[in-house]
Amino acid sequence: MATQIFTISHNWDLSVRVNEYAYAVNESGQQANRISNSAIFKVEREKLRVTPYFEAMFPGLWRDSAAHEITLEGDNNTLALEVMFHGLHDSLETRGPISVSMVTVWRLLLACNTYEVEYVEGPLKEWFKAWFEAENNSTEYGIDCEFERQVMGPCYHFNYAEGFAKATKWLVYNSDCHILELIPDESASELQKLHLPQRVIQLCVIEQLNAARGRLRNILHKDLFNSVASILGGRECDCREGTVFDYLKELWRVKVWPLDNAFKDASAMDVLQKIGRFDASHIRSPVQQGNNCYCNADWSDIVMKAALRTLDYFDGLCLDCMSVTKCLMEGRDPDHEYWKNGEKKKYDVSCCISHHQPTWYFSFMGRRGRSTKTSY
């Protein structure tokens, strides 16, 4: 078995040996751990000592010892450790291409938590941001939502607000079923601890993302049929039955009506793409001209504006708005916090991302006892 050697710093004075283990059947037929892979990282001792974990490994004898190697047992992703050590040396730019698998990113977080390495700020966060943007731009969307479901956790843990907003927005608009978080390797039990915190899953991922997805349907329905309601509730004319029939028939032709059926097993983007095929020339001209007849409407404009308002409605979840929940742990009244934030004229005034009221509404994780009074 060859040992991989990674030179993290040319000024190295310490070798970190990492042994990866795998189950194997020994000669007696019993399962036992055996070393499946081994790697050596050549690092600077002083760079590692900034973390409490490694500092504790260099007391007394180790601090000035001639021994130049320590061993870490059981880490199962060499690439994750390579990124971590480069982060500690602020030398990630020397590593070359940043492309690694999603599993490696999750194991990087696991390693940083184990060895008490800072990643919410500093080189590792910047590396993750670059990795996210590169992967996000190259992922083949439209096949499934696997990437976005798996990347929510890392974006949350790295406190990368832009990435978290992009991932959650993409899921709301492109999911054709209930939205859930996904671990890249469900068989790796050690990754389970990196799930989004239970409160975040319950109040933001499961409840709020799926509520936002349902809200898109309501927004679209309202804007598509407000003009029809005006015709039915307005003064009678000889053309209103024909106009309403033609309008509904055209929506039916492009498979957008009935709207509940259109959203069944389809994403919001699927429905909006179908709306793009709407052809107002299929609606007969009104018999009565002028503003007194509600049938005399620009149906193409009505449908286009409904689609655009739906498309512009949700900006994804905001980590800064979600952080308001932390105030609840300090003994502050959750109702007060909710309404104090709800009185804002600008909902992203102290946020890393730009967003409108719906993002603030769905991102807040406190109680909503009176939220029905809030226009969202």
Image: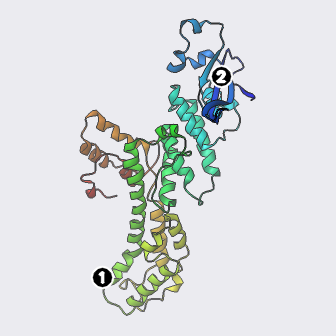
Task: Kindly state the secondary structure of the residue where label 1 is placed.
Answer: helix
Amino acid type of the residue tagged 2 in the rendering? Arg
Left or right: 4 in relation to 307: right
Q: Which residue does the image show at 51% across and 20% down from the upper left?
A: 53
Quarter of the view holding residue 21: top right
Task: Kindly state the secondary structure of the residue where label 2 is placed.
Answer: strand
Question: How many other residues sit within 10 Å of disc 1, few (<14), some (14-19) or many (≥20)?
Answer: few
Q: Position of residue 16 (x, y in %)?
A: 64, 21
Left or right: 156 in relation to 238: right
Which mark sits nearer the N-terminus, 1 or 2?
Answer: 2
Q: Which residue does the image show at 50% across and 69% down from the upper left?
A: 271
Residue under numbered circle 2: 17
Residue under numbered circle 1: 233
Q: Position of residue 341 (x, y in %)?
A: 31, 45
Front residue (pair 210, 180): 180
Furthest toward the front, the residue is: 28
Q: Position of residue 3 (x, y in %)?
A: 73, 27
Q: Which residue does the image show at 26% across and 43% down from the upper left?
A: 334
Question: How many other residues sit within 10 Å of disc 2, few (<14), some (14-19) or many (≥20)?
Answer: some
